[in-house]
Image (cartoon, helix red, strand yellow):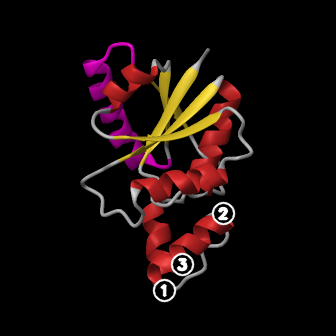
Amino acid sequence: MRTVIYPGSFDPVHHGHLEVIERASRLCDEVVVAVASNSEKNALFTSAERVALLEETTTHISNCKITSFQGLLVDFFRQTEANAVVRGLRAVSDFEYEFQMALMNRSLNIDLETIFLVPSQERIFLSSRIIKEVARLEGDISELVPAVVKDAVWKKFH
């Protein structure tokens, strides 16, 4: 069985994230979407809320499992006995950061392979940070996130 982990903060999950999950689900037997706790980010949603939103927005993907983790990705990778990690790349700046992370992860675990997926042109600009800023300023995010996520974000700000 080929299992990949798609780690991220998913705060909030958006259509770009879902596209990566859907594409990864076609490439392997199981996609483990792993909600990470990142102390450097000021999260809008709790880890449990992010897991719940991901569960609700991925029900159509039968080989997708949602969970959360703390600590190093390499430790979670060992625990799940995954074959690879999937990451989305939007821009050159993403590549630089993700490349460094992939090399660090591999230095900690030689078996950890990273697969990079580039989103479609329609989704390449999406980021959770931008979505939160637009919502905070009362902009329309309905085309950027699933309806359940839009409602959850709206409740946080209004």
Tally of numbered tags? 3
What mark, if any, has residue 146 been given in the picture?
2
Question: Gap between marks 3 and 1, in whole Å?
Answer: 6 Å
For the record, the magenta segment spans 90-112
Element on which disc 1 rests: loop
Within-10-Å neighbours for mark 3: few <14, some 14–19, many 20+: some
Q: In which quarter of the image is residue 100?
A: top left
Q: In which quarter of the image is residue 23?
A: top right
Within-10-Å neighbours for mark 2: few <14, some 14–19, many 20+: some
Residue at left offset 46%, top offset 76%: 156
Residue at left offset 31%, top offset 40%: 70
Can residue 111 be found in the magenta stretch?
Answer: yes
Magenta stretch, main secondary structure class: helix
- Above or below, 15 against 58 in this view is below
What mark, if any, has residue 158 been given in the picture?
1
Residue 117 screen position, x and y as percent: 56, 36
What mark, if any, has residue 154 been given in the picture?
3
Q: Are marks 3 and 1 in contact (CB under 8 Å)?
A: yes
Question: Gap between marks 1 and 2, in whole Å?
Answer: 18 Å
Residue 155 screen position, x and y as percent: 52, 79
Residue at left offset 60%, top offset 74%: 151
Residue 65 vs residue 141, the one in the foreground = 65
**What amino acid type should be assigned to the residue bearing mark 1?**
His
Residue at left offset 33%, top offset 42%: 97
Within-10-Å neighbours for mark 1: few <14, some 14–19, many 20+: few
What mark, if any, has residue 43 been given in the picture?
none
Q: Which of marks 1 and 2 is nearer the N terminus?
A: 2
Element on which disc 2 rests: loop
* Viewer can see residue 142: yes
